[in-house]
Image (cartoon, helix red, strand yellow):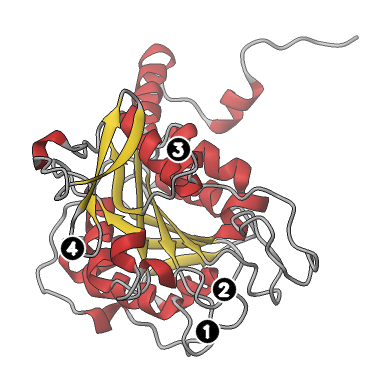
């Protein structure tokens, strides 16, 4: 992405604005803000080239708390505005901040086309599986049966699986992290920044008021080794309290196996290849427990990453071609065109 190096190394404090942070005590957004401010001095980008674009929701107040350029925009439209910013200023490092309601409900159309177009920007979705700013309605990622103020007998909708949705929209970079795992989140943020193309990062974010502990199974000491699996490119898929479980492929059917009981070598297990789209789709479906009713661990890390041409470069090349053919023209001339007629 943008690689110009600043002369004087900044610190996390240099990216902290003077605005009072107004999230609820214990909100996972604090951790995400902290990790972003922590990694930014290491990204090698001049401070004035960072831009944050957010929609509406608790997460979208993020732009106020970063001492960078930014825009707290309108509901569900952050991706569209960020695309325009990047198209007009390709040298900027553009970051989109959105929540699960903002990105996948009112902004769903913009989300899928942002993935498809592949501008060179970073798209972070803070997923707490609830509408928090409006006091606790179920969201597009709330689980089926979720009891809320708008679903007192339980939601009857199937939730979006964000990583599967992004892959289906031809995303070139898909990753997942947690607010309660700072080091992992920092590593994922750095990978997202370094990737050339739209990097989509879903962050599981705890809402202590309206959906507390929704993701604690994946972060708490007593459960996370059984419930979560951490992906590393070139490494086998292993999990369990004593790393005794692995995942193998039987054709295209994942199987959980006991490594130690069956003396299975690690190189016989599924080796994670983050450039393999077919396997990325399979991993993303661990979310749904769709494989013979077996509960698979939830994957964290980079699920898929394969660069392809970015939108703004193709657009710039096409503009240059048009100028060679027709020369530079005024906007009025372009809008009026060369096929006009007179109505008598």
Direction from residue 183 to residue 295 in the image, left or right: right
* Residue that badge 2 annotates: 58
Q: Nearer the viewer, residue 49 or 19?
A: 19
Direction from residue 29 to residue 93 in the image, left or right: left
Q: Nearer the viewer, residue 24 or 152?
A: 152
Label 4 near label 3: C-beta < 8 Å? Answer: no
Point out the tag, 3 or 4, that comes first from the N-terminus. 4
Callout 4: SS: loop
Q: Residue at x 40, y 34 (%)?
A: 281
Callout 1: SS: loop
* Residue that badge 1 annotates: 23
Q: Residue at x 65, y 48 (%)?
A: 158
Label 2 near label 1: C-beta < 8 Å? Answer: yes
Point out the tag, 1 or 3, that comes first from the N-terminus. 1
Q: Nearer the viewer, residue 143 or 29?
A: 143
State how far apart marks 2 and 3 are (Cα).
35 Å
**Res. 41 visible in picture:** yes
Task: Note whether 23 is above or below 241 in the view shown.
Answer: below
Horizontal and vertical percent position of residue 322:
42, 18
């Amino acid at each position: 992405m943008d690689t110009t190096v600043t002369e004087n190394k900044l610190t996390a404090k240099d990216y902290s604005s003077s605005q009072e942070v107004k999230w609820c005590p214990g909100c996972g957004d604090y951790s995400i803000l902290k990790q972003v401010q922590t990694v930014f001095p290491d990204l090698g980008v001049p401070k004035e080239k960072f831009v944050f674009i957010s929609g509406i929701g608790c997460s979208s107040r993020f732009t106020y708390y970063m001492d960078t350029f930014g825009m707290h925009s309108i509901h569900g439209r952050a991706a569209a505005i960020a695309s325009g910013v990047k198209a007009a200023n390709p040298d900027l490092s553009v970051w989109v901040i959105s929540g699960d309601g903002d990105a996948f409900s009112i902004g769903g159309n913009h989300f899928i086309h942002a993935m498809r177009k592949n501008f060179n920007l970073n798209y972070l979705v803070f997923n707490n599986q609830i509408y928090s700013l409006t006091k606790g309605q179920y969201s597009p990622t709330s689980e089926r049966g979720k009891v809320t103020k708008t679903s007192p007998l339980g939601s009857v909708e199937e939730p979006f699986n964000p990583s599967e949705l992004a892959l289906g929209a031809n995303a070139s970079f898909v990753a997942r992290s947690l607010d309660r795992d700072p080091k992992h989140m920092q590593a994922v943020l750095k990978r997202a920044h370094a990737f050339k193309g739209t990097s989509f990062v879903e962050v599981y974010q705890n809402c202590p008021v309206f959906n507390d502990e929704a993701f604690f199974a994946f972060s708490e000491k007593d459960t996370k080794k059984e419930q979560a699996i951490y992906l590393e490119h070139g490494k086998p898929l292993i999990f369990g309290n004593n790393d005794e479980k692995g995942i193998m492929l039987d054709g295209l059917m994942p199987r959980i196996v006991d490594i130690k009981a069956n003396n299975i070598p690690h190189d016989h297990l599924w080796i994670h290849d983050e450039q393999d789209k077919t396997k990325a789709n399979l991993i993303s479906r661990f979310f749904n427990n769709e494989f013979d009713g077996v509960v698979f661990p939830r994957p964290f890390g980079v699920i898929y990453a394969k660069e392809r041409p970015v939108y703004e470069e193709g657009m710039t090349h096409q503009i240059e071609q048009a100028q060679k053919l027709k020369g530079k023209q005024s906007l009025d001339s372009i809008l009026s065109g060369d096929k006009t007629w007179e109505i008598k």
